[in-house]
Amino acid sequence: MVIEKRFMKTSKSMLISKKELKKIVQLIPSEDDYMCGLAINCIVFGYHNKQLKVLCIRQEELTKWYLPSGHVRKDEGINQAAYRILVERTGVNNVFLKQFQTFGDVHRIPTDSELAAELDKLPAPIPEKISWMVNKRFVTICYYALVEFSKIIPRIDFFSSEWTWADVQNLPQLISGNQQMVVEALRTIRRELQYEPIGLNLLPQKFTISEIQALYETILNKKLDNRNFVKKLVSMKILRKTDEKRRIGGHRSPTLYKFNKQAYTKALKQEFEMIF
Amino acid sequence: MVIEKRFMKTSKSMLISKKELKKIVQLIPSEDDYMCGLAINCIVFGYHNKQLKVLCIRQEELTKWYLPSGHVRKDEGINQAAYRILVERTGVNNVFLKQFQTFGDVHRIPTDSELAAELDKLPAPIPEKISWMVNKRFVTICYYALVEFSKIIPRIDFFSSEWTWADVQNLPQLISGNQQMVVEALRTIRRELQYEPIGLNLLPQKFTISEIQALYETILNKKLDNRNFVKKLVSMKILRKTDEKRRIGGHRSPTLYKFNKQAYTKALKQEFEMIF
DNA sequence: TCTTTATTTAGTATTTTTTACGAAATGCTT
DNA sequence: AAGCATTTCGTAAAAAATACTAAATAAAGA
């Protein structure tokens, strides 16, 4: 489903030729293959320069950004679909991905001509084959993903030509509903910081104490005492010292740590045992 | 949508008459009005006799039970739909209801004749108007509800003729997928016991310490020290003593308490403040 | 009426966890 | 070698969770 070419326009003309439109429409997924009225959104979190980032994309000339999204094939599970969509966008495997909420309020459904105006001047009325995707009320299942910033090379696709890592504390204008999704995703990872491997998935293999502490501070939005922070993680045996150090210039070089994955996931999964 | 008559059969005959079938089909919601491929399930929790209960329903002669469910009108939000479905079943207002997870794995879709066999010998092939509801792959948004046991009078409807409060520790045979939903709902309320008004919604207005403690013990599945339990709740100012007592015979009569709703919701909502 | 019984309630002691903070060690720069 | 910013080690106090002793109470039975 990843199409390297951007949503095409021959030149600066406002309309596409019928021939080109036909070609495009052939690439669009058919209503027969996908669950109608159902969408999946991925809130992809990365961490860089002590800031928590969200992957946003947009169609070049449009002002509003949106979150990576896609649809569910009739023959695939929703988790599977979310993973497929994520891989299409980020090109990485082994990504932490978790469903957190489904949104489905009713909004005013835009008319064909409003949509055409927004969708880079596609001719109105919207051709039938594309209309199920853009001109309907959708229920959206949202997932959040935690990725290692440096490993991601976002890919554009049919509906996008630009991408950016937006700072969560300074989001750009997003299309209707998407901002709320980011907010809820953030609330979720904040709550789940204690029992999901949030840090493990956002950080590179080796990192300093102050790097992981800054991550925790960003997510929790409060300062933590560095001395107690180390003490806690070390006493939980979550971290393991390496014999490497990072040169940060001007100061003492901090030791690089890595996760003790076993102890980490064990500590996290120490949720209550079930009745069953 | 609540239909007082049960899914009708003229007598003990295996098939319904064409005339009756026509009448039934008229009552079935049209595909035009509802989001297709999308369902909502409610896991309704009640608490009675120191046991946590789940509301289950079934079609009389079928062996398997299922959870209250319904569909989303094209012109209503999903939360609104869930609430409507819940009210239809329980007849109560002011119920705590919260979305917790969406399920959407692909299962083998039963054939018309298998369905007919299961659906109390409806004639196969399933009439077109009903088929969208029973013969498709569904994505199911699940909500859990907390109700005050004594105030609920479950209602049957078109697809059910029996109901029961099943003990969560001893669930009956449920249709495919429903057991997992109950398990996940339980995991959820266990986790959320600290920051959602779980107790408030499951208990009657006035209750004894040992009653609320037994509720917590059931949900958490472990014994709590009664002396420390009181101490904690009282120190949080969540409980307020009334001057009534409950006569339980043979022993000292325990004081009835009620919730200090203000302090309770305040204590619960003391979640971290948001970045935004 | 007095004793027995099972349970509720009050209070204290102990342990564990969290939070607070002083100060030395380190690596880099000048 | 001195200055510096940060890391790292260590202890101390405060708070919370847990454990336990024992008294108070209401109902039932002798």
Image: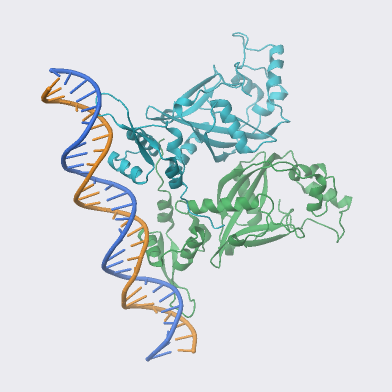
Chain colours: A green, B cyan, C orange, D blue
> Where does the image place residue A266, in percent across and percent down from the top left?
41, 51
- The answer to which quarter of the image holds residue B129 is top right
- Counting labels gives 0
Q: Is residue A114 visible?
A: yes
* Foreground residue among B237 and A257: B237
Q: In this rendering, is residue A31 above or below A219?
A: above
The quadrant in which the N terminus of chain B is found is top right
- The answer to which quarter of the image holds residue B35 is top right
Furthest toward the front, the residue is B243
Which residue: 54% across, 32% down?
Answer: B42
Q: Is residue B172 visible?
A: no
Which residue: 42% across, 55% down?
Answer: A264
> Where does the image place residue A40, in percent across and percent down from the top left?
64, 46
- The answer to which quarter of the image holds residue B8 is top right
> Where does the image place residue A185, in percent across and percent down from the top left?
56, 51
Q: In this rendering, is residue A201 above or below A136?
A: below
Residue A129 left/right relative to A260 = right
Residue B72 left/right relative to B253 = right
Which residue: 61% across, 9% down?
Answer: B13
* Foreground residue among B127 and B26: B26
> Where does the image place residue A107, in percent across and percent down from the top left?
70, 43
The quadrant in which the C terminus of chain B is found is bottom right
Q: In this rendering, is residue C28 above or below A55?
A: below
Which residue: 56% across, 36% down?
Answer: B142
Q: In this rendering, is residue A81 above or below A205?
A: above
